[in-house]
Amino acid sequence: MALARRKPETIDEYLTGVNAQQRVALEKLRRTIRAVAPKLEECISYGIPAFRLKGRSLVFFGAWANHCSFYPGSSATLRKFRNDLKNFQISKGTIRFSSDKPLPIALVQKLVKARIAEDKDQANRNRRTP
C-alpha cells in the first residue's frame, strides 16, 4: 500500500515537491509578487501556493507535470491583459507557461497590481451596498 503524500502547509513546502526548473521559475514568480505587494499573506489554498489580501485570495501559482501556471484570480484581469499574454496559453482563469519561458517580471507586476486594484474596487462597492 502506497503512503499518501502529506499536503504542503507552506509555499516553501510546496516548492520542495516540484522539479528544480519549475522551482526556479516559481520562486522568481513568488519574489516578484512579494516585491509588488510585500504585505500580502502567503498561504496554501486549493493545494497550491496563494497570496491573500485582507483575508481574501488574490493570486495563485502552481507546478504541473508539463507546465507551470499563474492564476490571477480574475477573468476580468486576464481579459484586460490578453494582448500582453498572447505568447502564453490561457484558459479561463489560468496562464500556463514553461519553466524555460517564464512570465516576464513586468507582466507579473502589472497583473498583481491590477488584481489589488480590482479587489480594492470590489471592497469599496461592497461597503456602499446597504
Image (cartoon, rainbow, N blue to C red):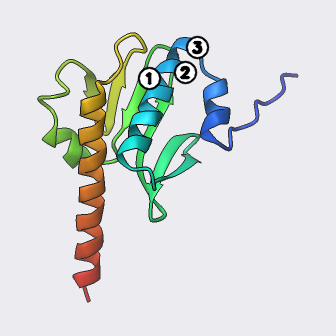
- Percent x, y of residue 83: 11, 29
Residue type of the residue flagged with mark 3 = Ala
For mark 1, what is the residue?
Answer: 68
Q: Residue 20 carries which label?
A: 3
Task: Look at 44% across and 27% down and name the residue there.
Answer: 28
| Residue closest to the far left | 83
Q: Nearer the viewer, mark 3 or mark 1?
A: 3
Q: Quadrant of the C terminus?
A: bottom left
Figure check: 43 above or below 68: below
Q: Can residue 91 be seen in this view?
A: no
As measured in the structure, the alpha-carbon distance from the residue carrying label 2 to the one carrying label 1 is: 10 Å
Q: Which amino acid does label 2 sit on?
A: Arg
Within 10 Å of disc 1 (Cα), the crowding (few <14, some 14-19, many 20+) is: many
Q: In which quarter of the image is residue 15?
A: top right
Residue indicated by mark 2: 23
**Quarter of the image where one finds residue 70:** top left
Mark 3: secondary structure: helix
Give the distance between the C-alpha atoms of the residues marked 2 and 3, in whole angstroms: 5 Å
What kind of residue is marked 1? Answer: Cys
Marks 2 and 1, the one that precedes in the sequence: 2
Q: Along the polypeptide, which appears first: circle 3 or circle 1?
A: 3
Q: Residues within 10 Å of mark 2 (few under 14, many from 20)?
A: many
Number of numbered discs overlaid on the protein picture: 3
Label 2 residue SS: helix
Q: 59 left or right of 1? A: left
Task: Give the percent coordinates (x, y) of residue 36.
Answer: 35, 45
